[in-house]
Amino acid sequence: MVVVGATDRPGSYAAQTLLNLQRAGFAGGLAGVHPRRSDILGVPCAPDLAAALELVGAPADAVVIATTAVTVPDYLSEAGRLGCGGAVVFATGFAESGDHAAQQRLVAAAGRHELPVLGPNTSGLVSFRSRAPLWTDPVALTPGAQDDGIALITESGNAGLLALAHRQGTGLHSVISVGNAAVIDTPDVLLNLARTEGLRAIALYLEQIPDGARLASALAAAAGSDIRLAVLRTGRHGTDEGPGRVLDALLEEAGAIACRDVHQLLETTRALARGRRTDRAVAVVTSTAGDAALAADLAADAGVELADLSKSTRDDLAGQLPRTAIPANPLNHTTQLWADADAMARITAAVAADPGVGAVLYVQDEPPGLHPEDSAEWLATRDGARLGGARKDVDVLLVAGMPGQEPAGAISGLPAAMTAMAKLRQPAPEAARLNRIAAAAAGARTGTPALGLLAEHSVKAVLNEAGIDVLRHAVVPVPPDGKDLDAVSTAVALAAAQIGFPVTLRLSAPGNGCGADSPSLVSGDKVSRKVAEILVEAAELEEQNRNDAALLIETLARPGVLLTMTAHREGPVPALTIGLGGAWAQVLDDTRTVPLPADARRIALAVASLPGTATADLATAGATGAKLSDLFLEGGFAELRVTFCEGTAVRAQARRLT
């Protein structure tokens, strides 16, 4: 390890890094770079990086660069040339301050020797297993602290600082702050951690919308290793709300639990790391009626099924519980059994042995500052519960309800524990599907320019060719020179008669989207009068749009649930956004987003979750949505928006990629 810019100046990033490493007991070679001093804070120093590497005896796994922005590119070039493993750059003064040219110079310097660089503007990284806190603030690594295999990837240095301070970093494997992510970003770190032995769960703190293809690939790697995810994303109600919804949908596909604050993020990740996947239900054991009642409510809120204990289990419990206790789930064993580890082991074993139970939550808070003799009672009670679960090979997760009163090894917060239990009872995310999403995202990157709106009749022809039902219709071209208007009117009236009255009539032209529908037309005379109105509208089109303009004559849509499906590339990956059409769209203002590609079953489930779709034909909606999605991905579209009535396209508009 080499710290460039080594100093003993209090409060400096370099001095703090050196102190962190020393206090943590970092066992690797350590040297500093300083132009004049040979020793700083007891760390040997050399005037340049090459000489410092001689002090550590080998190319450094990591080089911490704690110098000004202008010096960073040269140090990165040298570190890469000398074969160092990577670099951490604390300096500011790059893209975050508007100097994008400075950041480009940093990227170019790192790229000369393909040097991985964390930062700039990063708070650093902390590897608990290596006892290596390369961090700008004081970090105290508790000796012998339990490692639950939990990592935090954060786009906020402050969130990393909070994680390190929370419960003294207990359970953490690593914390990585990506800073400006000029070279290494969140998907890169996630992919690396997904391949790291011993990782069980990863917390993501996101401020930006990552590259979708690489994020989906990293999520697929995590799914393949059964690494569980929790995520806290800021900016959910800002300018990126639309793309953010696609990101949220992608993370949900990867099994990530959305969190609202850093405490919930960390504790949910802790619970995910400790639990096992099971399709069986959950049991709750505690010593108070209040905790039992609260646990039942929070389980319902999180969608957790509490096991219905069998009669034999209830009979077994009745013979072991005090007479005032009721054998039920949640189970209040009462304080009469407090500190009786043997009794607690028997009771928890009886609950864990029930065929419907896959996990047990034991709820206990321990007030801080207890006298050791008093604390021993809390310990005996919970250790008995843990022993009972171990006897039946069922996880017993210790949970504290009140932050700040967590016993050692407990999950802080029943909501976090319940949310994790609900997720662990669901099927594991599909790595293969996430890889397909990654491939679709890589096929046409977000931001590719799009053409203007195609004429609706052209879009419907494409839909029809793809096997998607469209309303019975006819198309009569509009003469670009404005002549033969009587012939146009005659042709429209004849088409309407062949389709069968009543019909609707509207202008279909490039750039015009879905033109305004006419009222229901029930006769040839009414059709002719409407044709005259529309031709006046067509004459006002720009010349380039008149060339493909037409009159679109359609039969009326039959009654049914209107669904609008929009396949688009507005987010990090291609997606299908589904909502109700017609007046209900304004009333309910609710949508569902599905990353693409997607099959009929997945789309049907999304439709079923929308309010107002109880009478919809879900099978038809799913099949139609799947065809639309395939057409969108294979047809080079930037956007494809269709309103369906029971699987038949009523309105359609599209933009192609340039």
Image: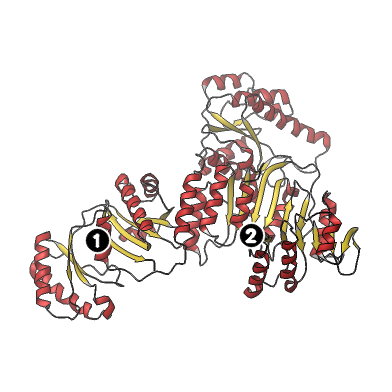
Q: Quadrant of residue 57?
A: bottom right
In this rendering, position of residue 181 left or right of residue 523 = right
Horizontally, residue 144 falls left or right of residue 303, namely right
State the residue position of label 2.
184
Q: Is residue 250 above or below residue 478?
A: above
Query: Helix, strand, or loop for circle 2?
Result: loop
Disc 1/disc 2 C-alpha distance (Å): 45 Å
**Residue 628, position in %: x, y?**
33, 54
| Residue occupying image coordinates x 56% and y 47% | 221
Is residue 595 visible in the rendered image? The answer is yes
Q: Position of residue 441 (x, y in %)?
A: 47, 57
Q: How is the image coloured?
A: secondary structure
Mark with earlier residue (1, 2): 2
Q: Quadrant of the N terminus?
A: bottom right
Q: Nearer the viewer, residue 113 or 198?
A: 113
- What amino acid is labelled 2 in the image? Ile
| The quadrant where residue 364 appears | top right
